[in-house]
Structures are given as C-alpha cells and as structure tokens.
Amino acid sequence: MNVFYRTFAVLSWLFMSIHIMAQPSDVPRTFKVTYKADYRGLPISAKGIRELQQTASGQHLLKSSAKSLFATIEESSTFLLKDGIAQPQAYRYQRTGLGKNKNINLDFDWSGRIVTDRLKNTQYPLKPGLATSDKLLYQFQLQADLLKASRLNKKPNNLNYTIMDESRIKEYQFEIVGEELLTTKLGQINTWKIRRSNSATDRSTTLWMAPEYEFMLVRFEQTDQNNKGFSLMIEEAQMAGMLISEF
C-alpha cells in the first residue's frame, strides 16, 4: 500500500509539472527567482530575489530585492490586470546602506488620473490615453508582451513603455537583438537578448529572457561607459509554486 501511494504521488507530481510548463497563457504565472547580484566596480556581491504573487484581494504583487552586507534595495509594485495590461496601483522603493538612502512611495488613482507621492505630499497628473507603468512593473509588462507575441509566433521589433518616474514621465524602448544560449547554475537555456534602445548614450541596459519559461528573466545587466554597473544571474527558480530543478 505504501508503495502504491508513493508511486501515485510521484506520478501526480510529474503530471502537475508537465501541466505547469505546457499550460497556454498570455500572462506570466506566479514565480520566485533568486539571482546572484554583482555591482561592477565595487567589492560587493549580493543576493537578488524577484517574485510575482497574487494577493487575496485579487490584485498582483511584483517584488524585487537585492541584499548584501553593505546595502539593501527593496522595490515593489501592486497592480491589476486589465485585458493583458498591468495597471499599477502602488509603487514602493527603499534603498539603505551604501551611498545615500532613498525612499519612494507612489499611489495611482486611475479614476482621477492622479499619482500621489505620499512622502512629498504632492500629486502628479497621468496623461489621458497612456498605459502608464512604473519603474518595476514595466518588466512584467515586457514579459507578458513577449509571451503573447510568442503564442502568435511573432517576434516584435520594438516594445515601448511609458514609465512614471516620480514626477517625470519617461519612455522606455526595447529591441530584440537576437537569441543567445546562456550557461547558468540551472543548466543551459536559450534566451532572447533584449536591449533598451533609447537609454542614455553612456549607459547600456540588457535583459536575457527565456521563452521556454514564459520569458522569465535569466540575466540582467546595466553598465556605464566606465564598465561600472549592476548585474543579475539566475541561480534558483520556481514557477506556479513548482521548483525548477534544472533547465
């Protein structure tokens, strides 16, 4: 009897794993990914975590953090999904430790099209007609847009996002520059290499995202003209509550 139950449990786990990887969707499912984070030009190595959750109220929560002995950065975006578009409700950012501490606390009122800065007690208008994102949430929207395009067997040339950066509205533009096979702690994985095409001339931002895993972020790199910057490389991953032991 014990053998029967153990066999049944193993078969059930395999079925669930296959179902999780094969289930079609235009929206990424919940995930939790751990990265090795490095700061170029500084003797700092940190642990980075990026996590997508669904809240009890039906909203979604995207969280990102990087922690080392010298500094901690925590960032989050609470949002709603409307027809495949992620609509931010609240954005939080906190940096402590190395360098100057920084906090951002923004709330989005879409009926009044107003963003309230809770720390500065100031309000900023949202432009009508724009699907405005925040400085973290655009990465989820990028993932969702790539996933939808992939389902349609398309590879978009450019992806554009409007970002609310405190009081300023910015435009982020990305282009797919090719495919690249990366070697990671979880094994080799094919990725789409995506570069921000309208970033400042002295800064380069590149993302490597895996189409086989709903365009999960595998590697991220941002460098300046002195080759200083920040990078992430995947080390552990879960999708829809299931551990990805290897690619």
Image: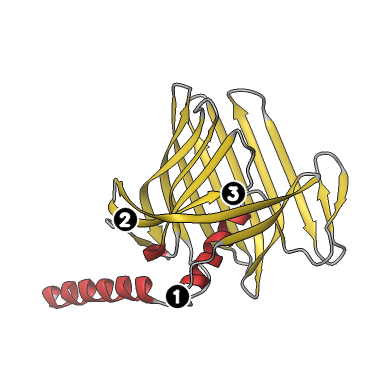
Q: Position of residue 111 (x, y in %)?
A: 84, 67
Q: CA distance from mark 3 to mark 1?
A: 23 Å
Horizontal and vertical percent position of residue 62: 57, 55
Q: Nearer the viewer, residue 12 or 187?
A: 187
Question: Amino acid type of disc 3?
Answer: Ser
| SS at circle 2 | strand
Residue bearing mark 2: 189
Instruction: Tell me: 188 left or right of 180.
Output: left
Q: Position of residue 10 (x, y in %)?
A: 21, 71
Q: Is residue 231 left or right of residue 14?
A: right
Say the numbered circle drawn on residue 153: 1
Rendering coords of residue 193 (x, y %) = 44, 53
Residue identifier under label 3: 197
Q: Specify which label sits upstream in the sequence, 2 or 3.
A: 2
Q: Amino acid at mark 1?
A: Asn
Image position of 165 with respect to 178: above or below: above
Quadrant where the N terminus sits is: bottom left
Image point (29%, 45%), residue name: 185
Q: Nearer the viewer, mark 2 or mark 1?
A: 1
Q: How far separated are the C-alphas under marks 2 and 1? A: 19 Å
